[in-house]
Image (tube, helix red, strand yellow):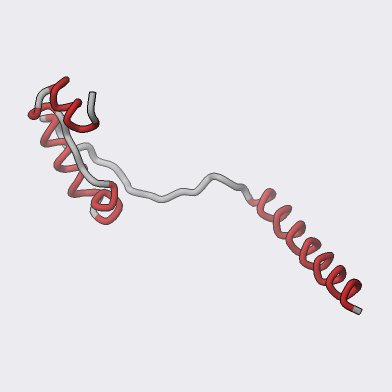
Amino acid sequence: MDGIDGLFDLFGFDNVFIFDYDSFKTNKEYILLQLCLFMDVDIPKYKDVYVNKSINGFQLECVRVFNYFTNYIRKWLVTFFTN
């Protein structure tokens, strides 16, 4: 199987939906509309909300404190070794 051509060979040209990620990032609604039309399904109602749950408030405060002390120690070391 050779990339996209392999997908066309395996599933047939009419059964492969291809889009580029940049288009999806700039115009999600259009790509999702095209995908729903391709799949012949109803367009779902949804709310496009960006939520970054990779770090919570407590973790953020810990990182801030760590950064403060890291910068303080770095400045102290630079001062100590340059004088």
Residue 78 figure quarter:
bottom right
Residue 19 figure quarter:
top left
Residue 37 on image: x %, y %: 11, 36
Task: Look at 69% across and 49% down and name the residue there.
Answer: 58
Q: Is residue 32 above or below residue 23?
A: above
Residue, far top? 10
Task: Look at 33% across and 48% down and name the residue there.
Answer: 48
Residue, far bottom? 83
Residue, far front? 2
Q: Quadrant of the C terminus?
A: bottom right
Q: Is residue 62 above or below residue 2?
A: below
Task: Look at 76% across and 57% down and name the residue there.
Answer: 66
Q: Nearer the viewer, residue 55 or 57?
A: 55
State left or right for residue 1 relative to residue 75.
left
> What is the tally of numbered marks visible in this picture?
0
Task: Look at 66% across and 53% down and name the residue there.
Answer: 60
Q: Nearer the viewer, residue 33 or 66?
A: 66
Q: Nearer the viewer, residue 83 or 73?
A: 83
State left or right for residue 15 relative to residue 1.
left
Q: Quadrant of the N terminus?
A: top left
Residue 43 on image: x %, y %: 17, 38
Q: Is residue 56 above or below residue 2?
A: below
